[in-house]
Amino acid sequence: MGKIRTFHYFRPLERDRREFHPDEPLRFDDFEVRAIDRFRDDLELLVIPVRNLGRIHEILGELDLHASQEFFDRECREVISVPEKHVNEQTGKGQVTFKVHFKNLPRSLASINGRALVVLCLHPLPGRDEEGKRNYRIAGYAHVNCFDYLDRSADRILPAYYYNLLRISGYQEGGKAVYRQCGMFGTIFSIFDKLTGINGVNVGYANFGRDNRGMQRSMNTLSRLFGKGYRRFPVDSYIKVNRLYRSRRWGTKLVDISGDEERIREFHEKNLQLRNKFLLHQYPTYSSFMEMFNSVRAYSPTSRIYMLPGQDGEMLSAALAMNWGDYFELTLEKPRGFFRLIASLKLTDRILWPTNSVGGSNDVARLWKGLAYLYQTGHKVHLSLMMAQPGDPFASLKRSLLRDPFVYFTMYNRVGEYESLESACRLDDGSVPIFTETPLT
């Protein structure tokens, strides 16, 4: 199966440490993978903790590559901002293709998942820079976010990988995309597979946009070649225009509980109770949730936890309100249907992402309308994004004319363990809800 490539895995000697200290040498271990790409040139393959991307110039220098941090950051922005198509290639169905421009990399993404690893495929070029170092181009970029989940079938906490920002460079020669047409994603997947073995991870999952036959064939092939189990999960994304959706009445009643430990514990416990059948609940413990929230709050002060109180101060509903405008800007490209109107209004630069909502349906609906008011008037956040899946208690509340259906998938190494987990999470209608809403999709 394919060729043998080697990647450098930068990690501290102590397995329980996630990143290097600021003054610590960036050591690495080499691992061989059997890659299935058709790319003929050499590649420098790296895996590095996201928190240490700010020291990538040290790594590049050691590998005899152009060591400019500024050049690397610019290359990353260009590759990450490759348009993401949510249009079916065979049927033409779908309304949206977009670019996401992340701000303040890597600090912004590290604030959401500090345990993330970054996978880099660097293509060394023939020329050298003024310092005599090899020039290069980023051919592929991906994140491996690490979350813990509760395996209900065995009552234990286990790690899972969530893959996102899977990007292949759109660089072209002779009108052809050099890296996309040679199976570069297959090489990234080879590294994903090796990392699960190195770190004892069974389940990995990701979003691959709108479902189509080409993607299905690719995933079926990869699962077969790597001996992995494979499942697909439909998810619907909805967008609401805050100016039309908001409610001043409910916005004035919301209470910010971001600094109230007792209330946050109550919020987290309600979340666990409401989503106790979800396959991969990324924050199964209070400490794991607070690690994420404290980091997000330090980076994005406008991302908060709000609750709607009752007459006696009880928690009727609550949600973590993520201000994605602090993290990225989104640009729609050649939108269709109602997305054309949204693009013409230039409202997509700021998005509210209310996640982990708890409470009764009526109270959650009021909470969301209140959040739309607070963020539209206070922070000029114009849209609210919501995702619905089988088993979602609030799916009917999320529906809107701006709908983008897409698919998540899981892949797993140990079949028996995974099937027991699915069985413990299966609902009466036979469906399996895949995950709670993470701060980063």
Image (tube, rainbow, N blue to C red):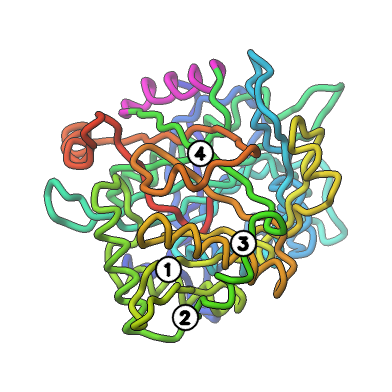
Q: Which residue is mark 3?
A: 59
Q: Which secondary structure dominates the residues rendered in magenta?
A: helix
Q: Is residue 173 visible?
A: yes
* Percent x, y of residue 201: 30, 48
Residue at (32%, 42%) from the top-left corner?
Answer: 203
Magenta range is: 213-229
Q: Is residue 364 magenta?
A: no
Q: CA distance from mark 4 to mark 1?
A: 26 Å
Q: Is residue 225 left or right of residue 105?
A: left
Look at label 2 and name its amino acid.
Ser
Q: Is residue 355 left or right of residue 337?
A: left
Can residue 64 be spotted in the picture? no
| The label number, if any, that marks residue 207 in the structure image | 4
Determine whether, in the image, residue 408 is placed left or right of residue 312. Answer: right
Name the mark nearer the viewer: 4 or 3: 4
Residue at point 83% right, 52% down? 346
Q: Quadrant of residue 273?
A: bottom left
The mark closer to the camera, 3 or 2, is: 2
Disc 2 + disc 1, Cβ < 8 Å: no
Do callouts 4 and 1 mark residues in contact (Cβ within 8 Å)? no
What amino acid type is highlighted by mark number 1?
Answer: Ala
Tag 1: Cα neighbours inside 10 Å, few (<14), some, or many (≥20)? many
The three-letter amino acid code for the residue at tag 4 is Asn
For residue 318, which numbered disc appears in the image?
1
